[in-house]
Image: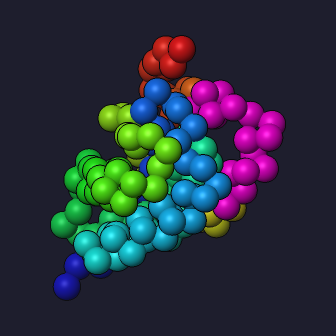
Amino acid sequence: MPYTKVMIHLIWYTKYRRPYISKELKPLLLSHIKENSLAKGIFIDSINCVEDHIHLLISLGRDQTISKTAMLIKGESSFWINKQNIASQKFEWQDEYIALSLSQSAVEKVRQYIFSQEQHHLKKTFKQEYNEFLFAHGFETPNLG
């Protein structure tokens, strides 16, 4: 039996970075994503969101890919929110995302970063955070408007 542990920090945002995730929606969304992911064999180590984006720390299974995992979580969660009619308007995630691999030694630091999103965004906008991630990891910085 092969042993694998591939930790991925996933970040994506709501369509047009609109503040769709209200304080009332947040716990429902996070709980649903955790439950649905568990049912699909997706292991979420850490998860948190603010009004316009979400961070997840996941461990990929040996047959899982980043794109398939992100698609399953994003697609199913937006479908569920809209089906339940628990958002003030139609809920959509933006198509793009950031996926960053990390070593086991960085896991605790990323967990703390994810759990402290509310405090973090008192000092920095999501646009600033997103562009910093892209720059720090050598990606071309898109125009987020």
Res 140 → quadrant: top left
Name the residue nearer the viewer: 123 or 14.
14
Q: Is residue 128 magenta?
A: yes
Report the residue at 23% width, 53% height from top: 68
On screen, 61 above or below 102? below
Q: Is residue 52 magenta?
A: no
Q: Is residue 126 left or right of residue 137?
A: right
Report the residue at 62% width, 34% height from top: 126
Is residue 48 at all visible to an observer of this figure? no
Report the residue at 38% width, 40% height from top: 90
Residue situated furthest bottom in the rendering: 1
**Where residue 39 sits in the image (x, y, percent)?**
29, 77
Q: Is residue 43 left or right of residue 27?
A: left
Is residue 30 at all visible to an observer of this figure? yes
Magenta span: 113-130
On screen, 10 above or below 47? above
Report the residue at 19% width, 66% height from top: 63
Image quarter of the N terminus: bottom left
